[in-house]
């Protein structure tokens, strides 16, 4: 009896450990129901909502925290190159316009799954400046192997604070 | 003994219930219950690339296109785009075998001014959504086989055939280092993405012009910045190579359908 309880407790701890590190990756239908099915419609991302093309990239909200919005689609990430400051928690909000994609930040421990009809959120902190490739890590179609974004981590001084309403990507820098 | 078992059973059940609740509940607590996005200080003005979205209604309108009605209306297109959908001027696009969705989308974008062209905006103003669907149905049915009696400009020899290897690499493999997907993974014949036209029988000069427009931002009607992010990364030589290669009729998928 005690053995069984011990086993159950151990399994619980293991389950908790897995979930607490990877909770944002768990894709159960329950999640979508609990979220009220409020995810963006993949077909109309460009018409309304937070993923219109003028709202993509790094943005600063009134509290001063940094949010990066991206779309993953066959077979490019938009924006293809993102720039964030080092040592600052960066909040990612990502959705997909068609298939399931995954951003794998090469050289770090981070990766993010992009699902059509749902927003994937996570907060990452990149310690040092550098350039990271972001290949798609979930087979998404014929051009999957050439689907690759880029992340540029710059020092905090180089990344001057954003103006209200400004959205920053590498192209404008 | 039997009493013990009797009391132990419900307790064990309660424990397992607790474990399950804990397992399912933890991620919810950690994720903070899917909070809505915080509205930032001020939103930038919304830029919509195209009013067309691939919703069920749109797809229904397009698939209901009547090819015969399109045939009657296509007489006004013949002057520039050729009687068989192959134009005699290389800067005008060929329409034979054009994808229905991309044809319809471009017509709507000309009408709404999302894509600019001095000629086509005037023409598209006079066409309803249904007219465009009919024309799309007609042009998608035209054969792409060559016709010696026609005055088409289509297969034009490459000016520099040494560029062919650059074109083949981009069309078949893309460039993973820069994140450029292969052309054939969206424009066929390997796979088609909604709104991506087949390129196998397209005029090279037209392709070159459109790639330049995507790259320098004078054409911005691609949904979710797809072609703009790709064209921006291509060098001038690569754009020329790909356009000339397709324009010479070497592109994959030339065989008539």
Image (cartoon, rainbow, N blue to C red):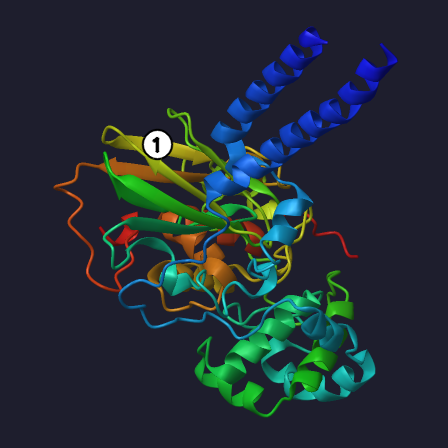
Residue A18 in percent (x, y) is at: 54, 25
| Residue drawn at the location 53% of the way across and 42% of the way down | B28
Depth check: give the residue in front, B86 or B219: B219
Residue A52 in percent (x, y) is at: 44, 64
| Residue drawn at the location 57% of the way across and 60% of the way down | A38
| Residue drawn at the location 63% of the way across and 89% of the way down | B127
Residue farthest to the right?
B2
Can residue B187 be seen here? The reply is no
Residue farthest to the left?
A157
Residue A25 in percent (x, y) is at: 55, 36
- Check the picture and name the quadrant holding the N terminus of chain A: top right
User: How many residues crowd mark 1 within 10 Å: few (<14), some (14–19), many (20+)?
Assistant: some
Depth check: give the residue in front, B139 or A129: A129
Residue B41 in percent (x, y) is at: 26, 65
Q: Chain of mark 1?
A: A
Instruction: Report whether A22 appears left or right of A62.
Output: right
Can residue A159 be seen here? The reply is yes
Q: Secondary structure at mark 1?
A: strand
Q: Residue under circle 1?
A: A132
Instruction: Report whether A17 appears left or right of B101.
Output: left
| Residue drawn at the location 56% of the way across and 41% of the way down | A101
Quarter assignment of residue B46: bottom left
Quarter assignment of residue A81: top left
Question: Above or below — where is B165 with respect to A3?
Answer: below
Question: Above or below — where is A96 with respect to B117?
Answer: above
């Amino acid at each position: 009896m005690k053995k069984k309880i011990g086993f159950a407790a151990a399994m619980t701890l293991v389950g908790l450990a897995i979930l607490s590190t990877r909770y944002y990756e768990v894709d159960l239908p329950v999640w979508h129901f609990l979220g009220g099915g409020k995810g963006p419609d993949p077909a109309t991302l460009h018409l309304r909502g937070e993923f219109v093309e003028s709202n993509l990239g790094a943005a600063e909200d009134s509290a001063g925290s940094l949010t990066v919005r991206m779309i993953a689609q066959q077979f490019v990430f938009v924006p293809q190159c993102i720039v964030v400051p080092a040592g600052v928690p960066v909040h990612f909000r990502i959705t997909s316009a068609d298939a399931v994609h995954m951003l794998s930040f090469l050289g770090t421990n981070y990766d993010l799954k992009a699902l059509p009809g749902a927003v994937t959120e996570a907060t990452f902190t990149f310690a040092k400046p550098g350039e990271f490739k972001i290949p798609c890590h979930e087979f998404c179609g014929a051009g999957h192997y050439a689907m690759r974004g880029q992340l540029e981590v710059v020092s905090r001084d180089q990344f001057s604070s954003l103006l209200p309403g400004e959205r920053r990507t590498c192209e404008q820098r | 003994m039997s009493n013990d078992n009797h009391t132990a059973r419900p307790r064990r059940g309660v424990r397992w219930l607790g474990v399950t609740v804990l397992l399912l509940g933890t991620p919810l607590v950690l994720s903070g219950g899917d909070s809505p996005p915080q509205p930032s200080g001020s939103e930038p003005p919304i830029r919509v690339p195209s009013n067309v979205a691939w919703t069920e209604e749109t797809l229904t309108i397009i698939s209901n296109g009547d090819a015969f009605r399109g045939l009657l209306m296509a007489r006004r297109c013949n002057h520039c785009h050729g009687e068989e959908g192959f134009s005699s001027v290389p800067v005008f696009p060929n329409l034979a075998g054009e994808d229905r969705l991309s044809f319809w989308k471009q017509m709507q974008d000309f009408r709404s001014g999302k894509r600019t062209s001095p000629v086509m905006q005037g023409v598209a103003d006079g066409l309803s959504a249904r007219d465009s669907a009919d024309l799309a149905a007609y042009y998608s049915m035209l054969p792409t086989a060559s016709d010696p009696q026609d005055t088409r400009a289509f297969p034009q020899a490459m000016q520099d055939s040494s560029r062919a290897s650059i074109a083949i690499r981009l069309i078949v493999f893309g460039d993973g280092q820069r994140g450029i997907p292969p052309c054939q993974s969206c424009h066929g014949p390997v796979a088609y993405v909604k709104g991506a036209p087949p390129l196998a029988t397209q005029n090279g000069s037209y392709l070159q012009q459109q790639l330049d427009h995507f790259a320098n931002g004078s054409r911005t009607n691609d949904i979710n910045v797809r072609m703009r992010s790709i064209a921006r990364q291509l060098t001038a030589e690569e754009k020329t190579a790909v356009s000339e290669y397709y324009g010479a009729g070497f592109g994959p998928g030339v065989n008539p359908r």
